[in-house]
Image (tube, rainbow, N blue to C red):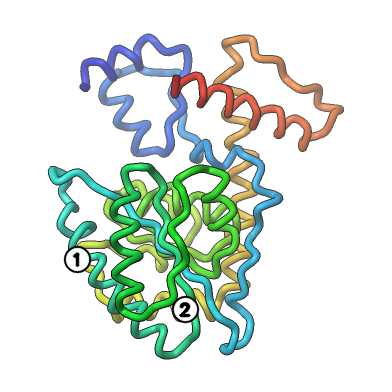
Amino acid sequence: GSRVLRGALQDACAVMLRDEDSARVAQDLAPGLSTAFSSPDLVFSLDWSQLRSTGHATHGPSTPLHIGVAVKSLPSRHGRFQDVQHRLPNVLLKTLSEFARKRSMKITVLPFATSDLTVARELSESFRAAGLTVSPVPTPEIASLQETVSGLDCLLAVPLHASVFAFACGVPTIGLSYDSKIDRLYRAFELERLCLPVQRLKAEHLGDRIHQVVGQGSSIRKQLIAQSRRMHKTTCNDVERLLAPFGRPREPAERGGENRLSSIAHQTRVCCEYARN
């Protein structure tokens, strides 16, 4: 794997990486690499303006909360397999059952990939069997996930892109971290306090964070949206920089930043689809 990656790095006209740690790995694999640079996740380049949070976490205690749980199916060889697939569901069930005794709420379990569907349905059924109010599991399609996430008051997220989606929508989120890339995302948003390692997760700690998110929902939303907008602009500029060697047209400056950013976001989608195929 490293041989293939090293060859790809050496042959590339430009390399855009998700964070500084990835950039360091790239430099180790291909010393002297001068075309690599780090950038926020490409998801931030999309237009999220119509998907801002519609949650009600700052309303009175009688208002039912809508809490999302984004799950992930890890391969058995993964170092955090036991923590994510076995310990975590029990902690979630205990935490949310206790929270439901104090506050009316409903839960939606979200799969962010087809491979997560079985885990999502199993967790949803365990919540329902415990007497919790549970919404149907949505399909792991972008439009469905965007619509569901934007309507949440709080998200408990295992997958990295569950946190990215929620941040971009301004939804207060608690990261259940199984990988350092999730920790780095929360540090970038100055929300380390809301990122908990799955291997040491306890119901009382998670319950405290949920109460914190509910109580500070308004300020957290503002922080998320402001930082997401900055990352949106940075990512779009970086995509333009990445595509420059290929002769992609730049929008004239006089047409305004928003038009240019929309164009670059479209180019990002095209590149992602091309890479996927």
Which residue is under mark 1? 87
Q: Which residue sits at x=27%, y=49%?
A: 73
Q: Which mark is residue 212?
A: 2
Callout 2: SS: helix
Along the line of sight, the residue nearer the viewer: 121 or 99:
121
- Percent of width and height locating residue 32: 34, 17
Location of residue 169 (image quadrant)? bottom right
The quadrant of the picture occupied by the N terminus is top left
Residue 165, placed above or below residue 243? below
State whether residue 135 is above or below residue 129.
above
Q: Quadrant of the C terminus?
A: top left
Q: What amino acid type should be assigned to the residue bearing mark 1?
A: Arg
Which image quadrant for residue 27?
Answer: top left
Q: Position of residue 86 (x, y in %)?
A: 18, 62
In terms of sequence position, does the residue under pointer 1 or pointer 2 come before the other? 1
Q: Are marks 1 and 2 in contact (CB under 8 Å)?
A: no
- Nearer the camera: disc 1 or disc 2: 1
Image coords of residue 146 (percent x, y): 56, 50
Rendered residue at 52%/77% (across/down)? 214
The answer to which image quadrant residue 208 occupies is bottom left
Cα distance between the residues tagged 1 and 2: 23 Å
Name above or below for residue 20 compared with residue 88. Answer: above
Point out which mark residue 276 bears: none
Q: Is residue 65 left or right of residue 130?
A: right
What's the amino acid at mark 2?
Gln
**Coordinates of residue 102 in the picture (x, y in percent):** 44, 90
Helix, strand or loop at mark 1: helix
Badge 2, how many Cα within 10 Å: few under 14, some, many 20+?
few
